[in-house]
Amino acid sequence: MKYEKTATLVLDRYYEVSEIDERIYGSFVEHLGRCVYGGIYEPGHPEADEDGFRKDVLSLVRELHIPIIRYPGGNFVSNYHWEDGVGPVELRPHRVDLAWTAMETNRVGVNEFARWVKKANSSAMMAVNLGTRGIEDACNLLEYCNHPGGSRWSDLRKQHGVPEPYGFRVWCLGNEMDGPWQIGHKTAAEYGRLASETAKAMKALDPSVELVACGSSSSTMPTFGSWESTVLDEAYENIDYVSMHAYYNNIENDSRDFLGSSVDFNSFIETMISTIDAAKARRHCCRQIDISLDEWNVWFHSMEHDKTIERWSVSPHQLEDVYTLEDALVVGTLLIGMINHSDRVKIACLAQLVNVIAPIMTEEGGPAWRQTIYYPFAHASQYGRGKALLPVVDCPKYDSKKYKDVPLLDVSAVWREEDGELTIFAVNKDLEDPVLLTANLHGFEPCEAVEHIVLTGEDLKQTNTSSCQNAVVPEERPRPQVEDSVLQAELPKHSWNVIRLKRIKKGI
Ligand code: AHR
């Protein structure tokens, strides 16, 4: 076959970006809509375990190999009283959730979440309320969770049946405090001081914690850049990460444009790195602050519906985006962007995990299934661990409404020395044609392709639903040829690709 569109990739075993921090394959559970209630937790469900957690959901979560899960919000945390969610369930109050104008029943709190996260083979990334509360409450929660005992809050934990401290390592200092929508929104200077003093107190209590200060809620925030500079100038010494949040949409129904979202994503990350390093330079110090991309995804399908939700509902159907094939491709390009910036992006959380802009959907009393975006995330989490290599790509480019020079292919590569395994992730954004990819593999021992997994389909708008759960699923393609360290693979039109190569074992 003669290809109209071709691309070349050069990979060299010694051109490394970084060892990937596995926490980039994190996710997020917020008390929002049906993420907790009706998502991970549904006591009356036929699949519920002894704690009321859905086993079908747990098994789909485990399949994603998620090392860290952020909790309990999100916007929710900025008006949350964690004490409402501990102790005897029958004594827990119902509270108005001002962020989502919903009713929180507090049947699940930090101890239930800790139990669930363990069952999910994961760990918790906690967030404290710096919206309506402050240093003292943040320290009380940390003491409750991580202090061994002999103090007011750690002894209360013991009284609640948890003798050993959890030792939660990563903590977010509030959520999206730059956003005017946030309950307790602050100016950068106000937040920077509060974050710094809260961090100082939390580290005095437990020096093992790693703390994330809020950066910008999106690349389009008018304060992006200046917000980080002010916060970092206040808090640099006391924090470990700056957060960024990134959501993309196809509201204008322009697929070429939407598929170009990673142009903005990559530049957002790179500008964030420069902003952080400029603060470092101003201080003449050498400690590096890294990025926690603690919310990212595609989000827009549910926005109109959500305007109709009745105020103070208990776990309403909210932010229930039903994802298409093209959403999965965009998620793939964002995963590739993270891998390619893994020298500075050390934590990332796919927002969210179940029902709420999520890879997993459930029906009350019914099934749980995988949305389209489940697949690129599962592949990256499974095969994207090891060393990220620098992908040198030469491919056609296009201009779209919002973006200039959108590369037709997004590519990343991960090398796992111990298993002799090289994985190439690639998205072909071309809507009409396949692209022939020629990859020159330098410095690797002889290897062969063992698998070419593809997620594609004729209809970019195809979704997986309760009644048709497998409309968009990955398929195996014929294994690409590798000759003299040159791989040739056909990447179908609008597709997510995982090409796995393995070192050839000698002389058995
Ligand atoms: O993930 C949904 C919401 O998006 C989060 O609560 C908030 O932090 C962000 O605006």
Image: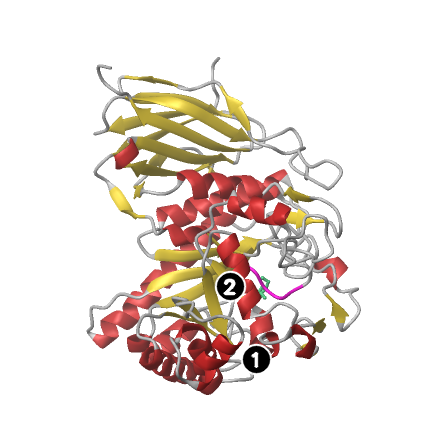
Please tell me whether residue 294 is drawn above or below residue 407 in the rendered image: below
- Give left or right: position of 242 versus 180: left
Residue 304 image-quadrant placement:
bottom right
Give the mark, 2 or 1, whose residue is nearer the N terminus. Answer: 1
Q: Is residue 473 left or right of residue 194?
A: right
102 or 214, nearer to the observer: 102
The stretch of residues the image draws in magenta is: 27-32
Q: Is residue 73 visible?
A: no
* Residue 424 seen in the figure: yes
Percent x, y of residue 457: 62, 29
Residue 121 location (% of width, % of height): 47, 51
**Residue 27: percent from the left, percent from the top?**
51, 55
Q: Position of residue 420 (x, y in %)?
A: 28, 31
Residue designated by label 1: 83
The one of 117 and 320 positioned closer to us in this rendering: 117
Q: Which mark is residue 114?
A: 2
User: What type of secondary structure mainly makes up the magenta span?
Assistant: loop
Quarter of the picture containing the C terminus is top left
Q: Amino acid at mark 1?
A: Glu
Q: Residue at x 76, y 58 (%)?
A: 305
Q: Is residue 138 above or below residue 335?
A: below
Whether 377 is among the magenta residues is no
